[in-house]
Image (cartoon, rainbow, N blue to C red):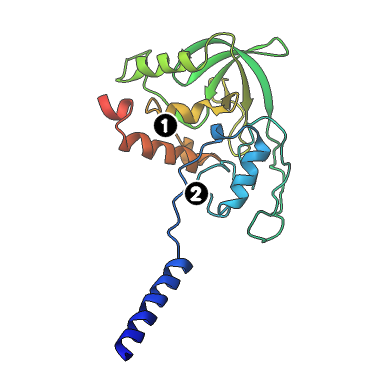
């Protein structure tokens, strides 16, 4: 009788333990392109360990997720489901520059020509990445990177150019240094995640989205995508 009671007690304890610690399914990796607007991305960001940012949504490290997405927007960090209260938000200095432009030409995988709304034509160097050369000595993967950029950014495409306050506004060749977004897609990062570009940190001065871009590069390497697979 005692053995039977003990067996029932053990079974009850195991059942309760199973109820107390359900196996949590890991959330799949999310990208800014998975959200319809910035406010939606911000809610997800705040509800999923914003201090660690496991999905790399806060590339600028200012408490705001996916700032290139269309509004409705959240203009300051806020409390999420963790109940930790509002996250202080301090505007970057110097101020981030954002402007829309149309693609005029693809020079190579990491350089494009755009026409600003003012009518001015500018060369743009995609910030934070480097693709194999196609001029002055061809490198493996250069043609593929240029072709990928042309597919992502057909002539006439409207893009948003975003500066990084930690970096210069122009490089030594007088090209604008910018993140280039097409709708909700960060084109710079997309070239990295597809293996057509490598992360490029100039003079050991990390740009604000470095962690997110390096995460994309690790994925491309593991999957042998682009240059990591055929060069």
Residue at image location 54% in from the left, 34% down from the top = 34
Label 1: how many Cα within 10 Å (few below 14, some 14–19, many 20+) = many
Disc on res. 179: none
Q: Is residue 152 above or below residue 83?
A: above
Residue matched to label 1: 193
Please state if 173 lies on the left or on the right of 94 as rendered: left
Q: Position of residue 29 (x, y in %)?
A: 46, 42
Q: In this view of the protein, which residue sits in the foreground, 221 or 30?
A: 30
The residue that disc 2 covers is: 54
* Count of numbered marks: 2
Pointer 2 local density, CA inside 10 Å: few below 14, some 14–19, many at least 20: some
In the image, residue 222 above or below residue 154:
below
Query: Is residue 121 or residue 187 the one in the foreground?
Result: 187
Whole-number angstrom distance, CA of label 1 to CA of label 2: 16 Å
Q: Is residue 168 left or right of residue 143?
A: right
In the rendered image, which quarter is residue 39 located in? top right
Q: Residue at x 26, y 24 (%)?
A: 230
Earlier in the chain: of badge 1 and badge 2, it is 2
Residue 60 x, y percent position in the rendering = 59, 42
């Amino acid at each position: 009788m005692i053995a039977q009671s003990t067996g029932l007690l053990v079974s009850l304890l195991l059942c309760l333990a199973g109820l107390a610690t359900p196996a949590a399914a890991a959330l799949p990796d999310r990208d800014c392109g998975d959200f319809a607007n910035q406010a939606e991305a911000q809610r997800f960001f705040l509800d999923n360990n914003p201090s660690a940012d496991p999905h790399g949504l806060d590339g600028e490290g200012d408490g705001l997720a996916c700032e290139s997405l269309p509004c409705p927007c959240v203009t300051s960090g806020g409390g999420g489901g963790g109940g930790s209260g509002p996250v202080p938000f301090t505007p970057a200095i110097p101020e981030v520059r954002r402007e829309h432009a149309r693609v005029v030409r693809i020079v190579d995988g990491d350089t494009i020509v755009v026409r600003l709304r003012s009518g001015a034509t500018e060369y743009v160097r995609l910030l934070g990445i480097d693709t194999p050369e196609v001029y002055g000595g061809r490198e493996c993967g250069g043609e593929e990177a240029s072709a990928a950029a042309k597919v992502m950014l057909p002539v006439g495409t409207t893009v948003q150019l975003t500066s990084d306050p930690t970096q210069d506004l122009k490089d030594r060749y007088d090209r604008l240094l910018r993140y280039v977004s097409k709708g909700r897609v960060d084109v710079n990062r997309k070239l990295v995640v597809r293996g057509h570009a490598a992360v490029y940190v100039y003079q050991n001065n990390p740009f604000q989205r470095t962690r997110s871009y390096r995460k994309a590069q690790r994925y491309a390497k593991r999957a042998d995508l682009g240059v990591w697979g055929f060069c």
